[in-house]
Image (spheres, rainbow, N blue to C red):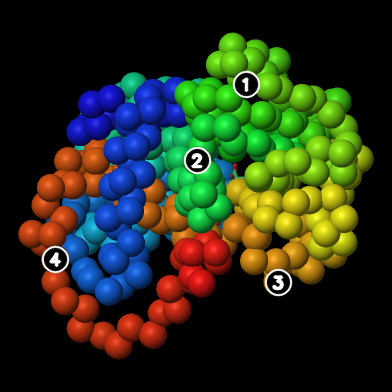
């Protein structure tokens, strides 16, 4: 893939060597994210961060990643405060905003909307989530996390055993992750969801065509016994016609420490793209798992910053210039570097 100037719309643009390039660039971002060094390599550059659908971590993570490389961020948040509500087309919005920015990140509730926007943009556009369709930067940070967690256990991504759990029909993170896993070898994927919220057939097919072993089930306990990763997801209530319908499924696959201890191998890694739904105690991951060292959910968000910094550096073609624009950190750094998988810290 030719990174400089590329739009990132789908994870299917990536080949294995591109993923390797993103991950090894992400590794180089750690000192900047940890604030042991500054780089001003994107000084003067502007990111347009356009989030037309709810977001906390993806929006702030993209924005912070850009800031950490020295760039500035301008934001538009929510449909109500943008001219889309006055009937402006996505293409016109793109024509205007791309005149103000060097790169744009966008999230929108409609599948395909970010590609439509990109078709009229004069600068690279990164898909921050388009409806139920895709969330490519999340898939990259998820796989980067999987790589790091498994490395600490002496394993690699090939031969991975993963259970994806929850709303696999609407969850764009599991859609993009499944597409990404289809590039690797000999993966065992267990898809755990209510039948009504099953993974779309074409994605199951894609995994099978890649030679992976796919099991579809409605039972959480039976499927988490023999996997490296349990990847839990939220019921995507915003994609249902009403909340009552989403309530039918909420809490169906709740994982807590007792279930983990009883059914999982002791080293099983627990992931979730977040936010986890913590109403009514917990609907996916119980807070009693917070003390479990294999809960990787906050390592995922830390890794997300590194991966998004890498994407910006590759797309704006500054990976060779990071060190040239380094500066010492003038302030006292009291950060606790809690980035590494726990096994690595021993
Ligand atoms: C996810 C999303 O928006 O698709 N969150 C995220 O970006 N980390 C998952 C979700 O909202 O459940």
Q: Which residue is mark 1?
A: 212
Q: Residues within 10 Å of mark 1 (few under 14, many from 20)?
A: many
Q: Is mark 2 within 8 Å of ligand 1?
A: no
The reply to whether residue 151 is visible in this rendering is yes
Front one among 101 and 200? 200
Q: Is mark 1 within 8 Å of ligand 1?
A: no
Pick the front one: 291 or 343: 343
Earlier in the chain: of badge 4 and badge 3, it is 3
Which is nearer the N-term, disc 1 or disc 2?
2
Q: Nearer the viewer, mark 2 or mark 3?
A: 2
Q: Is residue 146 above or below residue 133?
A: below
- Local SS, label 3: loop
Earlier-in-chain disc, 4 versus 1 = 1
Q: Would you say the residues marked 2 and 3 are in contact, meaning their CB atoms lie under 8 Å apart?
A: no
Residue 237, position in %: x, y? 76, 42
Q: Is residue 55 above or below residue 210?
A: below
Q: Determine whether, in the image, residue 102 is placed left or right of residue 59.
A: left
In space, the residues marked 3 and 1 are separated at their CA atoms by 33 Å
Q: Earlier in the sequence, mark 4 or mark 2?
A: 2
């Amino acid at each position: 893939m030719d990174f400089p100037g590329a739009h990132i719309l789908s994870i299917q643009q990536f080949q294995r060597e591109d993923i390797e390039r993103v991950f090894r660039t992400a590794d180089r971002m750690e000192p900047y994210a940890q604030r042991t060094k500054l780089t001003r390599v994107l000084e003067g550059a502007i990111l347009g961060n356009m989030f037309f659908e709810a977001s906390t971590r993806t929006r702030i993570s993209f924005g912070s990643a850009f800031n950490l490389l020295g760039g500035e961020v301008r934001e538009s948040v929510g449909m109500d405060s943008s001219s889309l509500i006055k009937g402006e087309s996505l293409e016109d919005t793109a024509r205007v905003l791309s005149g103000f920015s060097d790169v744009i990140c966008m999230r929108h509730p409609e599948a395909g909307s970010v590609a439509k926007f990109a078709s009229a943009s004069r600068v690279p556009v990164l898909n921050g989530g388009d409806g139920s369709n895709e969330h490519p930067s999340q898939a990259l940070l998820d796989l980067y996390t999987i790589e790091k967690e498994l490395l600490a256990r002496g394993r690699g991504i090939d031969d991975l055993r993963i259970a994806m759990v929850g709303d696999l029909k609407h969850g764009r993170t599991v859609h993009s992750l499944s597409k990404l896993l289809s590039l690797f070898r000999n993966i065992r994927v267990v898809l755990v969801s209510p039948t009504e919220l099953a993974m779309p057939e074409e994605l199951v097919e894609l995994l099978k065509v890649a030679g992976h072993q796919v099991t579809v089930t409605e039972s959480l306990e039976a499927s988490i016994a023999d996997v490296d990763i349990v990847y839990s997801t939220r019921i995507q209530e915003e994609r249902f016609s009403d909340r009552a319908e989403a309530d039918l499924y909420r809490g169906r696959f709740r994982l807590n420490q007792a279930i983990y201890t009883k059914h999982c191998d002791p080293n099983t890694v627990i992931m979730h793209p977040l936010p986890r739904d913590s109403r009514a105690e917990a609907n996916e991951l119980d807070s009693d798992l917070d003390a479990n060292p294999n809960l990787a959910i906050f390592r995922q968000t830390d890794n997300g910053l590194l991966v998004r910094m890498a994407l910006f550096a590759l797309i704006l073609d500054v990976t060779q210039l990071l060190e040239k624009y380094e500066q010492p950190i003038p302030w006292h750094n009291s950060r606790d570097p809690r980035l590494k998988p726990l096994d690595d810290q021993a």
